[in-house]
């Protein structure tokens, strides 16, 4: 049984989808939900599901990313995860940290990578006049939003879409895509998932 730690910064809707998918014959189980933001809504949702939670507040560390990540690593090691899922986790990780978890850490990004790495992805897709938008699950490497893509879900951009309406449409697909990719990944299967 693979042990999965999930890192969040906010409401944790992707974390909830992942946790709720790890049942029955699923080869993985959640062992920790960790937030860099004290009081993040996802912490309560994880606790309601009986999942151990932890907080490593990044603010006391200022720009000292290595010191923050040392604390992060300490909190993670207690849970002995086999896989780390970044789910709405809004901190940039150093190559030292991504290297330590190389091949075992996933992230969901709200664009059809390699398009629109970084922030404001939906506004950028709308501004570009793209017909489609979506989300990607990728392995985390030293390159921000740059690792091998393990799955994508595509949605149409509708006339009159705002970043908010598009984000809501994409989020529904995130909640289908991430669990589907994690299930395969936990079985050692890197065949990409494509939705629909
Ligand atoms: C989502 O838009 C996701 O694409 C991004 O973080 C946002 C919030 O995710 N990674 P969640 O509801 O906290 O899972």
Image (cartoon, grey):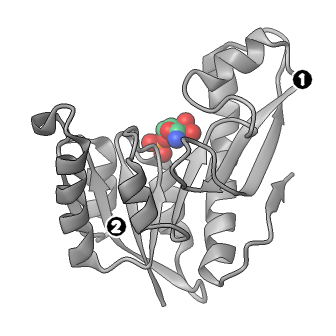
Q: Is residue 110 left or right of residue 95?
A: right
As drawn, the residue found furthest toward the right would be 131
Q: Nearer the viewer, residue 132 or 84?
A: 84
Q: Residues within 10 Å of mark 1 (few under 14, many from 20)?
A: few
What residue do we see at 69% from left, 17% from top? 124
Q: Is residue 34 left or right of residue 17?
A: left
Compared to 124, does 99 lie above or below?
below
What residue do we see at 42% from left, 47% from top? 12
Q: CA distance from mark 2 to mark 1?
A: 38 Å
Compared to 171, does 163 lie above or below?
above
Asked if the residue at tag 1 contacts the one at tag 2, i.e. Cβ–Cβ closer than 8 Å, the answer is no
Rendering coords of residue 48 (x, y %): 29, 62
Rendering coords of residue 133 (x, y %): 78, 31
Compared to 81, does 152 lie above or below?
above
What residue do we see at 27% from left, 77% from top? 79
Rendering coords of residue 161 (x, y %): 74, 14
Indicate if the residue with disc 2 has its beta carbon within 8 Å of ligand 1. Answer: no
What residue do we see at 69% from left, 47% from top? 136
Count the marks: 2
Pointer 1: what residue?
A: 131
Compared to 97, does 20 lie above or below?
below
Q: Is residue 83 left or right of residue 116?
A: left
Query: For residue 81, what is the image quadrant?
Result: bottom left
Point out the tag, 2 or 1, that comes first from the N-terminus. Answer: 2
Q: Nearer the viewer, residue 125 or 21?
A: 125
Q: Please, what secondary structure does the residue beneath circle 1 have? A: loop
Q: Please, what secondary structure does the residue beneath circle 2 have? A: loop
Q: Which mark is residue 77?
A: none
Pointer 2: what residue?
A: 49
* Mark 2 or 1, closer to the camera: 1
């Amino acid at each position: 049984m693979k042990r999965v730690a999930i890192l969040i910064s906010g409401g944790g809707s992707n974390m909830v989808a992942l946790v709720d998918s790890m049942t029955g014959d699923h080869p993985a189980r959640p062992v920790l939900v960790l937030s860099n933001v004290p009081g993040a809504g996802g912490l309560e949702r994880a606790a309601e599901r009986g999942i151990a939670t932890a907080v490593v507040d990044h603010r006391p560390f200022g720009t000292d990313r290595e010191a923050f990540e040392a604390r992060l690593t300490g909190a993670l090691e207690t849970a002995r995860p086999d896989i780390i899922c970044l789910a709405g986790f809004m901190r940039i990780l150093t190559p030292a940290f991504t290297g330590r978890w190389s091949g075992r850490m996933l992230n969901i990004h709200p664009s059809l990578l390699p398009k629109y790495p970084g922030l404001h992805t939906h506004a950028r897709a709308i501004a570009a006049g793209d017909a489609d938008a979506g989300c990607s699950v990728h392995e985390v490497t030293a390159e921000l939003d740059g690792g091998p893509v393990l799955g994508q879900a595509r949605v149409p951009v509708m006339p009159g879409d705002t970043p908010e309406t598009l984000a809501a449409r994409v989020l529904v697909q995130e909640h289908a895509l991430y669990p589907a990719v994690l299930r395969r990944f936990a079985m050692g299967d890197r065949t990409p998932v494509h939705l629909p």
